[in-house]
Amino acid sequence: MNAAFDGWVKVGKLGDVPRRGARCIKSGDVTIAIFRTADDRVFALEDRCPHKNGPLSQGIVHDGCVTCPLHNWVISLESGEAQGADSGRSASFKVKLKGDDILLDLKDVHRAGRR
């Protein structure tokens, strides 16, 4: 992780994350998956499916969601909520683009690590 911008921390460049894919970063004991959609929106979720802790970063990104590679649970990239009949939530974090830089609000990440 790099420089801070107004309380946000630069965690990479948009080009570091493939379209419809993810890259992971660590903050303390929390692994965060940074997702990029086909239309270049970025989202950040804890890299754990609420079902069996599957690695969401290895899932398929589609329609504002990611499908867990272990048991096909569909998780909203915006809220972290499981979709359909499944229930549960992965921690979601504030993330934004500033130019080509991906910025993450780390205060939310540190709260997630304490749960």
Image: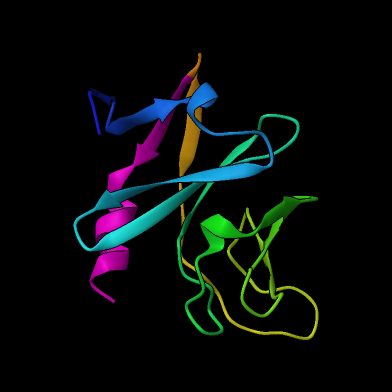
- Location of residue 48 in the rendering, given as x and y in whole percent from the top left corner: 46, 70
Residue at coordinates 53% horizontally, 73% vertically from top-left?
A: 49
Counting labels gives: 0
Residue at coordinates 50% horizontally, 13% vertically from top-left?
A: 99
- Location of residue 21 in the rendering, given as x and y in whole percent from the top left corner: 62, 43
Q: Which quadrant of the rendered structure holds the C terminus?
A: bottom left
Q: Which quadrant of the structure image shows residue 4?
A: top left
Q: Which quadrant of the structure image shows residue 8?
A: top left
Looking at the picture, does residue 80 appear above or below residue 57?
below
Looking at the picture, does residue 99 appear above or below residue 2?
above
Looking at the picture, does residue 64 appear above or below residue 114?
above
| Residue projecting furthest to the top | 99
Looking at the picture, does residue 76 appear above or below residue 115?
above
Q: Which residues are magenta?
A: 101-115
Q: Which quadrant of the structure image shows residue 88?
A: bottom right
- Location of residue 17 in the rendering, given as x and y in whole percent from the top left corner: 53, 33
Q: Is residue 43 left or right of residue 39?
A: left
Is residue 13 found inside the magenta-colored segment of the image?
no
Q: Is residue 30 left or right of residue 45?
A: left
Q: Is residue 113 left or right of residue 83?
A: left
User: 38 or 8: which is nearer to us?
Assistant: 38
Residue at coordinates 62% horizontally, 53% vertically from top-left?
A: 78
